[in-house]
């Protein structure tokens, strides 16, 4: 069984370009979470989505960042007009349901470098 | 702000010894406390969780202790092995869905 798949694993962008990060959750999981991790720091919650719905985007910057989880296909985290401060590892996680114990299944992350 | 935080950034342990990683939390409304392990270059991996109405839970070579009086959480790893070298995050869950809030992490270094 495939776990959470993220791509690309590494992405280099110049300032002002767009970055698109994709996440395919564990098969059967309908809940997706995106986290950002700066070097030597913890993971910061960004957004929680269910199929076609954004449930909680309280951790996502209001400008330039957007996320979606369409009925078909992977979840996408989109960063427009990237700046150097966007350089980080972005992790996607999935879970099968709500009301659980906090066990999230994480992907290997997408590492964004902004030049 | 953060609801969980760790005492020490780095812990060095001799192989075969027991490891204890500590964590303080501030959110009394947390439903679960969780420990994650993150190896270099990889995503976090769930280790063990404990419900807020419990004070101890054991897994394979790991034990989590919860002291609600002083809002303290610890992860004990028995007979630490080189493969245990990683960053360990405590985290909490609250709000009725799987919004997991992470602390800053402790790096565990196992000395052969």
Image (cartoon, coloured by chain):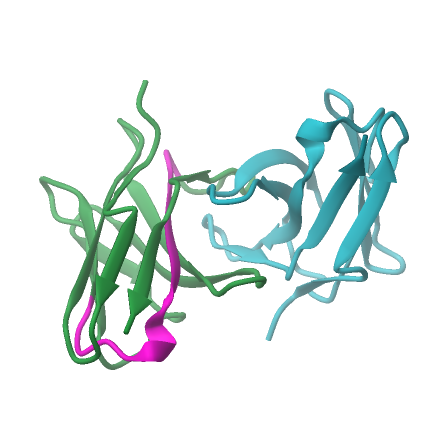
Name the tint of chain B in the rendering.
cyan
B69 relative position to B97: left or right? right
Magenta span has A87? yes
**For residue A79, above or below residue A107:** below
Residue drawn where x is 90% and y is 30% of the image: B17
Where in the figure is residue B9, as x and y percent of width and height?
A: 75, 60
Q: Give the quadrant of residue A45.
A: bottom left
Vertical position of residue A33 compared to residue B79: above or below: below
| Outermost left residue | A72
Residue B23, percent from left and from top: 77, 55
> Residue B59, position in %: x, y?
73, 24
The color chain A is rendered in = green
Task: Pinpoint residue B45: horizontal percent, then vertical percent.
Answer: 54, 37
Q: Is residue A23 visible?
A: yes
Q: In this picture, is B96 found above or below A62?
A: above
Camera-nearest residue between B96 and A12: A12
Residue at 36% of width from left, 69% of height from top?
A87
Q: Quadrant of residue A31?
A: top left
User: Magenta residues?
Assistant: A79-97
Q: Is residue B30 left or right of residue B97?
A: right
- Side of B108 where B89 appears, left or right: left
**Residue shown at 38%/40% (left/top)?**
A107
């Amino acid at each position: 069984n495939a776990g959470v798949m993220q791509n690309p694993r590494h992405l280099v962008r110049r300032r002002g370009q767009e970055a698109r990060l994709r996440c395919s959750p564990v098969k059967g999981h309908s809940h997706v979470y995106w986290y950002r991790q700066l070097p030597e720091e913890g993971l910061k919650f960004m957004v929680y989505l269910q199929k076609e719905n954004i449930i909680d985007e309280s951790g996502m910057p209001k400008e330039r960042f957007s996320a979606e989880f369409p009925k078909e296909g992977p979840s996408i985290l989109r960063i427009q007009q990237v700046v150097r401060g966007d350089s980080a590892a972005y992790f996607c996680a999935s879970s099968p349901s709500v009301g659980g114990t906090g066990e999230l299944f994480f992907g290997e992350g997408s590492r964004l470098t902004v030049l | 702000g953060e609801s969980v935080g760790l005492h020490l950034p780095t812990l060095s342990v001799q192989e075969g010894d027991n490891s204890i990683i500590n964590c303080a939390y501030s959110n009394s409304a947390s439903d679960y406390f969780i420990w994650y392990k993150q190896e270099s270059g990889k995503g976090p991996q769930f280790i063990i969780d404990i419900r807020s109405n419990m004070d101890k839970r054991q897994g394979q070579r790991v034990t989590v202790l919860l002291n609600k009086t002083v809002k303290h959480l610890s992860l004990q790893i028995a007979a630490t092995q080189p493969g245990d070298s990683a960053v360990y995050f405590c985290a909490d869950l609250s709000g009725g869905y799987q919004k997991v809030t992470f602390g800053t992490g402790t790096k565990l270094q196992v000395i052969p």
